[in-house]
Image (cartoon, grey):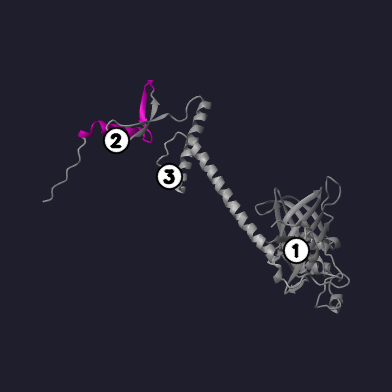
Amino acid sequence: MTFDKCLILVTIFQLTSGSIGNAPVHLDLNEINLVQYDVRIEDQPIIVDNVDSDSPAVQDDIMILPMTNKHGQKYQCQLPKPKEVNEGGKIFDPSKPNDETTEEEAVEMSDLEKAKKLLQPMAGQPCLLRTRDWWTYELCYGKFIRQFHMEEGKPSGPILHLGYYHYDKELDEDLKNSETKIKRHHTQIYANGSNCDLTGNARQTEVRFECDPTSVMDAIIQVDEPQSCQYVITVLTSKICAIPHLRPPPVHKPVKIECRPLLTSTEYEKYQNYLKVREKNTAKKAEEIKDKHKASLLKALDGEDISHIDVTTDEGMSTIEEMVGGKLADKLVNELGAIFGKPLKPKTKLIQPENGGEAFEVEEIKLRTGEMQSKPVGLTAFQAIIKDFITKAPSKIEPKKKRSQS
């Protein structure tokens, strides 16, 4: 069945609405922007006599909803059960009937304080290192960041300070609540580093701690310098994954919506007849294509002796296809030979022995003396000499006599 755009749009609207009918409707725009829908209109209709009511019905987590497209065709669609919402448009949480803030939440630490506490163990751990090209970058958490060249496992040459710990920065509210592809992170600012010759200002670094639930150890994964002497260092860690808004955005699986057309008994009978006619026409078209292909193959072998091949069988047609393929290959070789000024494949001819033996194919080879010599196709020069020797002097080769047993 083909998709009906109007039906799909109305179905999605019903799905994203918190209620149906005369009740207040909540349209979740965030869901429309982020959630993908796998809408399928099945080709197995439902006889309308078996449907008791046109009103929506809920079965566990599935809602069964009757729909009608712009042509008047009725459908029965299965949708995920919508989330319940209160009058304020917020999703209802049964564990908090009045959506009141508990005393524990009131005294809970801020996200900034949580991040600082979760990352604090890094202060007692070895500094993080990252080598990029010539330079190695060293981050000592809560202390400083250095840049130097490493030789034989130790710094060599001048050491530049890219900043000393200054402060932790709260994540922007718009990024905290966003589910876009922008990566969420906790930020630390390291300032007052070595003087920059290009700008005359002190070097400064922004360190971004990103949550990676699969990370077993903290690591610098990227070092950027978007502006002269201003750096951005990205660190992957699992320590801050306990903070919900720092976790990676959830991966939304496509929401499945299945719709089946509703037909009366008479319409269903017509639909079955239509399927039979369509199946018959499809088979007829496939047979016509097969016959055209067969005719084109036989035309390509016009003049060839194919009387020994049964072209009515699949095996026989396979042989015909091989013969046509070989003939086209020979034609291509000859055309290439004409382009290069000489045949790429020697001309061959079939020779019938005078003694009535089996016919064999030979190719004409031009010798250095200018004389033409016939050589059996498929035999090497050595094989041709041996065969010629055996043919001309068979009497000189006698089978070895068996020893008599005493």
Type of the residue with mark 3? Asp
Label 3 crowding class (10 Å Cα cut-off): few <14, some 14-19, many 20+? few
- Using the numbered discs, state the Cα–Cα distance from disc 2 to disc 3 in whole angstroms: 27 Å
Please state which of the two labelled residues, at mark 1 or mark 2, is closer to the viewer.
Answer: 1
Type of the residue with mark 2? Gly
| Residue at the (83%, 60%) spot, across then down | 175
Could one spot residue 208 in this view of the protein?
no
- Using the numbered discs, state the Cα–Cα distance from disc 1 to disc 2 in whole angstroms: 79 Å
Type of the residue with mark 1? Lys
Segment tinted magenta in the rendering? 368-395
Residue topped by disc 1: 74
Residue 318: where, in percent of width, then height? 47, 45
Based on the picture, tell me whether residue 386 belongs to the magenta stretch. yes
Residue 1: where, in percent of width, then height? 69, 57
The disc label shown at residue 310, or none: 3
- Do the numbered discs 1 and 3 sit on residues whose CB atoms are within 8 Å? no
| Residue at the (33%, 34%) spot, across then down | 359
Horizontal side of residue 362 vs 72, given as left or right: left
Residue topped by disc 2: 357
Horizontal side of residue 362 vs 19, given as left or right: left
- Closer to us: 28 or 385: 28
- Do the numbered discs 2 and 3 sit on residues whose CB atoms are within 8 Å? no
Label 1 crowding class (10 Å Cα cut-off): few <14, some 14-19, many 20+? some
Based on the picture, tell me whether residue 288 belongs to the magenta stretch. no
Choose the circle earlier in sequence order: 2 or 3. 3
Please state which of the two labelled residues, at mark 2 or mark 3, is closer to the viewer.
Answer: 3
- Using the numbered discs, state the Cα–Cα distance from disc 1 to disc 3 in whole angstroms: 54 Å
